[in-house]
Amino acid sequence: MATIDEELDWGVLRDAAERGGARELARAVFLRDPAERRDLWRMALRRIDEHDGALRNFELLIDVAQAGIDDAITLSNQAADAASAAEWADAANVLSYNLSASLADCWPDDPAPRERHHFEIGLRAAEDCIRWRWELGKTADRRAMGYWAAGMHHLSLGNLAEAWGGFATAERLVRGNAKGGHGAGVTAGGDFGVILYHGYAGIARWMLGDDEGRRDFERACRAFEETHSKDPERQEDARFGLEQLRCVEERFLKTAKG
C-alpha cells in the first residue's frame, strides 16, 4: 500500500501552491503514483482548509478539489475492473463531500465570508456526492450526509423548500438506521444524526414561516443539552451538534430578523 509523508509532502505541495496556485500544486501531485495521488489530494484539501493557515482561500480550495475529483474520475474510467473503478469513484465522492462541507456556512469556528458562487459550487458538489453514494451502495448515514450538505447550501441560497427537503431526507435516512440505545427519538441519548438533522429541518421550516419548525429546532437543542449534561461519553458530540445548530440560527434567523 502506498503511503505519504504528510509533513514532507505538504511542504512540497505548499511551496508549489505558493509559486503558482492550484496549477502548480496539481503539477506536483501528478508526478506521483495514482495511489499516492489519492491521499495527496485529500491531504491538500484538509491542509488548505485549516482556518489559521496561510493558504486558506476558497478559490484555491475549489480548484484543487476539482483537480482531484477530475483525476479520480479519469482513473475510475480507466480502471481494469469494477472494484478499482468503484474505489476511484469513492475517492471522487470523498473529495466532493469535503469540498461541499468546507464551503458550507454553518461552522461555529469559521466566520470566513462566503459568496453566492461558493454555495452554488458547494451545492453541485453535494449533489454529485449524493449520486455517487447511491451508486456505490453507501450506508444510510453516509447518504444522509450528502443530503444535509445539499440542504445547507440550499439554505444559504435562499431555496428554503429545497433546504427543508434535503434536511428532512437526511433525517429520514438516519431514523431508519438508528438502533439500540442510540434510538431514533429526538431526546437525550438519541442518535446524533437524527437530532442534528431534525434541528436543521426545523430551521428551514421556521424560515418558511411554520412555527412547528421552531419547536422542532428547540426540541433538537434540548436533546443535545440534556445529552451533554447526562452522558459524559457523548458530551463532545452533543456540544458540537448544539453549537452548530445555534450557529445556523444566529446566521440565518437572528440576522434576518435584524
Image (cartoon, rainbow, N blue to C red):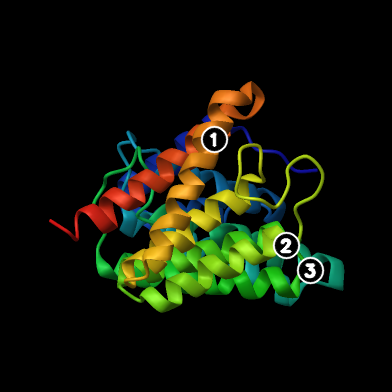
At label 1, the amino acid type is Ala
**First in sequence: mark 3 vs mark 1:** 3
> Residue at 51% across / 74% down in the picture?
165
Residue 162: x %, y % from top left: 44, 77
Quadrant of the drawing holding the C terminus: bottom left
Label 2 crowd (10 A; few <14 / some 14-19 / many >=20): some
Determine which quarter of the picture holds residue 228: top right
**Badge 1 is on which residue?**
238
**Badge 3 is on which residue?**
137
- Mark 2–mark 1 Cα distance, whole angstroms, equals 21 Å
- In this view, 194 is above or below 188: below
Proximity of marks 3 and 1: CB atoms separated by less than 8 Å: no
> Is label 3 in a helix, a strand or a loop?
loop
Q: Is residue 7 left or right of residue 210?
A: right
Q: Nearer the viewer, mark 2 or mark 1?
A: 1
> Is label 1 in a helix, a strand or a loop?
helix
Q: Which mark is residue 140?
A: 2
Confirm whether residue 70 shows in the render. no
Quadrant of the drawing holding the N terminus: top right
Proximity of marks 2 and 3: CB atoms separated by less than 8 Å: no
